Image (tube, rainbow, N blue to C red):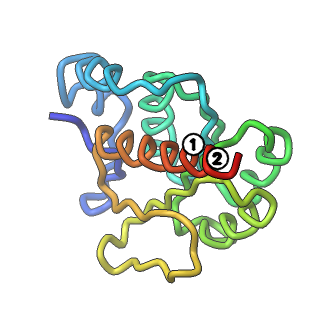
Amino acid sequence: MVPSLTHESATGVEPSAHTLENTVEAGAWIDCSRKQAPAGALTILLVEDEKFVREATRNVLRAVGYRVLTAGSAEEAERVYDLQRDHVKLLLTDVVLPGESGISLAGRLRRENTGLGVIFVTGYGEKMRLSESEPGECLAKPFSAGVLLQRIRDILAAQTSAEARSA
């Protein structure tokens, strides 16, 4: 079973990285994911305010070969993006962030880079609906590493296809 990446807020207990590792045999979920490794080291900007979720997600993405830049807020994400804008291919952002929403952040970054892939992550599940004007897909928490990696591959494949058509 692949562990889900979420904060156990319903019970008030935040699992540690040690807890996540003990969910399955040590390394089994990463070994399984290695079969889904990307071609080349693509850069993902991960924006998540919950430290455990941010670190667990970063570890999964790095384990399969992605280069991951992290931020805990939209403001921090903009600073990171400004330094690495030429390398970032995908924004993976929580919808609800301190200060400013991930949707607003994505809109600004997409105005600068229309080819930027976007995945919104939300704990609101089916209640969360993106308007048609919002770029990107929505992934409900909790999600498995396998589902996340598949969404990322799908978006990156669509970007590659779009780039090939425009060339």
Residue at the image point whose x is 72% and y is 60% from the top = 114
The answer to whether the residues at label 2 and label 1 have Cβ atoms under 8 Å apart is: yes
Q: Amino acid at mark 2?
A: Glu
Q: Position of residue 139 (x, y in %)?
A: 38, 60
10 Å crowding of disc 1: few (<14), some (14-19), many (20+): few
Residue 163: which disc? 2
Residue 110 rendering spot, x and y as whole percentages? 71, 63
> Image quadrant of residue 86?
top right
Front-lying residue, 103 or 24: 103
**Amino acid beneath label 1:** Thr
Marks 2 and 1 sit apart, C-alpha to C-alpha, by: 5 Å
Q: Is residue 3 above or below residue 25?
A: below
Query: Who's the residue at 28% across and 44% down the image?
Result: 144
Q: Is residue 89 above or below residue 21?
A: below
- Which residue appears at 78% of the width and 54% of the height? 78
For numbered disc 1, what is the local secondary structure?
helix
Quadrant where the N terminus sits is top left
Quick check: 20 left or right of 98? left
The residue shown at (81%, 60%) is 112
Q: Nearer the viewer, residue 76 or 105?
A: 105
User: If the image is split into quadrants, where does the C terminus sit?
Assistant: top right
**Residue, disc 1:** 160
